[in-house]
């Protein structure tokens, strides 16, 4: 049975910040009750900490009474952050890429790391900034993140009453999960609230780590329409866990110009090893953007909404060979107006990235080293809590995507098609061998998803 829509679902990062073994919370926190009180105390450097009492309600959300920031950001700042996210996405995919289908989300991983970043100090912060390719001020980074989330959450333009296409939907979500009774700094919680819309969900990691795991995974399932399940493994949370940061994004839409299912037929798809497989190939002739820059041929597939998929076919070699030659500027494609004879396979797959190891390979090392270990590099997350005892023990990244004839859509593409009156040049684009693809948000240019397809039959 055909999948009736395109789904691209990602839970980007679960950062498990854990206290050192000699700083475990008192076991009395293992019995939450139905009341919560809080006091404040002064931390080193004048920061004010928010200290929940030993009595708390497991699952309660503690969020400082702050509205989302409405600060204006410049186009230059948005472009700088988007370019940095794209560079991070290329870094991630270069580590993850092999002979299998794979997908990552530059947007979502970057957002989750940005949620951790304001809590980092010293070398820990410097390494996170380098992994993020950060070239703007810290405050600007968070303002741009807030702006991008706001634009992503904007309601799509309504479809006509007789339009049978699925309404365009992008659903990003951020959350933070903390141990009840643990002294989190107000300054850190303020950043989460005002720029990421994330309150602190109180959980009992000490007394019920299995229940905490179930609660977080259930939240992920809800915000991703059950496409991502069991994000956090059963053994990832233990009695020393103090904070988990999660970013998730769920995407669903139709193509602006949908493929006719009657035109789909089995055809040959060349694999990386030289063999061929027979796969369902969709066919269409659409007026859209086409480009050939010598490295790759690319076609722009708009959605009925504020996004588009770009499919990039290497002129020679494999997608991994092409990936080594790309940088963020290559994503700024100058599209020509063409009537494209298009061939694209249906595909569906899930992918999982060993995110901790990947981030370490990119130079984010200190965050994963427990304080007091004697290492030259030790985590400094004293922007989260005054005592230097937290470090990141693990990180997780999973994705799911399915593409068929109905696909997704972009409003910007509809304006392009209806606004051009000149006769387009003809072009042929056949994705019948391994290719790269990415899904970009039209208004901001943010790359939401980036991946490769080497075998459309591979789930």
Image: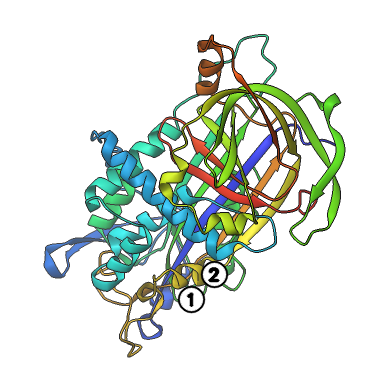
Answer above or below: position of 210 versus 400.
below
Q: Quadrant of the N terminus?
A: top right
Residue 284 visible in this rendered orientation of the protein: yes
Determine the secondary structure under disc 1. Answer: loop
Label 2: how many residues lie within 10 Å, few (<14), some (14-19) or many (20+)? many
Residue at 59% over, 73% down: 235
Determine the secondary structure under disc 2. Answer: helix
Q: Which residue is mark 1?
A: 239
Q: CA distance from mark 2 to mark 1?
A: 7 Å
Residue at 16% over, 62% down: 47
Percent across and percent down for residue 172 are 49, 41
Numbered-mark total: 2
Residue sitting nearer the eye, 114 or 216: 114
Percent across and percent down for residue 380 are 29, 73
Q: Which residue is mark 2?
A: 209
Label 1: how many residues lie within 10 Å, few (<14), some (14-19) or many (20+)? some
Q: Quadrant of residue 209?
A: bottom right
Instruction: Give left or right: position of 440 versus 254.
Output: left
Residue 199 visible in this rendered orientation of the protein: no
The reply to whether discs 2 and 1 touch (Cβ–Cβ < 8 Å) is yes
| Residue that protrudes farthest toward the front in the picture | 294
């Amino acid at each position: 049975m055909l999948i009736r829509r395109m789904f691209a679902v990602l839970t980007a990062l679960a950062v498990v910040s854990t206290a050192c073994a000699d700083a475990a919370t008192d076991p009395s926190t293992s019995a939450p009750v139905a009341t919560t009180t809080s006091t404040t105390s002064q931390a080193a450097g004048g920061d004010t900490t928010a200290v929940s009492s030993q009595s708390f309600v497991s699952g309660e959300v503690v969020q400082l009474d702050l509205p989302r920031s409405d600060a204006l950001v410049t186009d230059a700042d948005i472009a700088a952050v988007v370019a940095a996210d794209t560079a991070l996405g290329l870094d991630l995919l270069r580590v993850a890429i092999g002979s299998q289908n794979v997908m990552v989300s530059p947007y979502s991983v970057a957002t989750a790391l940005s949620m951790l970043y304001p809590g980092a100090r010293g070398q820990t912060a410097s390494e996170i900034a380098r992994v993020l390719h950060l070239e703007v001020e810290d405050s600007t980074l968070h303002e741009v993140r807030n702006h991008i989330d706001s634009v992503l959450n904007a309601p799509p333009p309504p479809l006509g009453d007789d339009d049978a296409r699925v309404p365009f939907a992008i659903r990003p979500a951020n959350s933070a999960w903390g141990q009840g009774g643990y002294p989190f700094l107000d300054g850190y919680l303020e950043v989460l609230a005002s720029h990421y819309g994330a309150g602190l969900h109180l959980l009992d990691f000490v007394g019920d780590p299995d229940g905490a795991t179930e609660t977080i995974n259930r939240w992920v399932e809800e915000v991703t329409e059950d496409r991502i399940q069991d994000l956090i493994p059963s053994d990832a949370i233990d009695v020393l866990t103090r904070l988990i940061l999660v970013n998730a994004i769920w995407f669903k839409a139709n193509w602006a110009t949908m493929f006719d299912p009657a035109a789909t037929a089995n055809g040959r798809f060349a694999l990386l090893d030289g063999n061929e497989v027979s796969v369902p190939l969709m066919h269409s002739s659409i007026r859209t953007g086409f480009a050939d820059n010598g490295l790759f041929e690319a076609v722009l597939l708009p959605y009925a909404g504020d996004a588009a998929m770009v499919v990039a076919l290497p002129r020679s070699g494999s997608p991994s060979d092409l990936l080594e030659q790309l940088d963020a500027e290559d994503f700024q494609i100058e599209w020509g107006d063409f009537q494209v004879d298009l061939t694209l396979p249906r595909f569906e797959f899930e992918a999982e990235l060993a995110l901790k190891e990947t981030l370490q390979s990119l130079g984010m090392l200190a965050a994963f080293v427990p304080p007091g270990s004697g290492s030259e590099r030790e985590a400094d997350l004293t922007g989260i809590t005054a005592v230097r005892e937290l470090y990141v023990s693990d990180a997780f990244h999973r994705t799911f995507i399915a593409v068929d004839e109905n696909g997704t859509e972009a409003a910007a593409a509809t304006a392009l098609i209806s606004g051009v009156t000149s006769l387009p040049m003809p072009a042929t684009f056949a994705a019948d061998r391994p290719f790269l693809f990415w899904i970009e948000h039209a208004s901001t240019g943010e790359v939401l998803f980036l991946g490769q397809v080497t075998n459309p039959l591979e789930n």
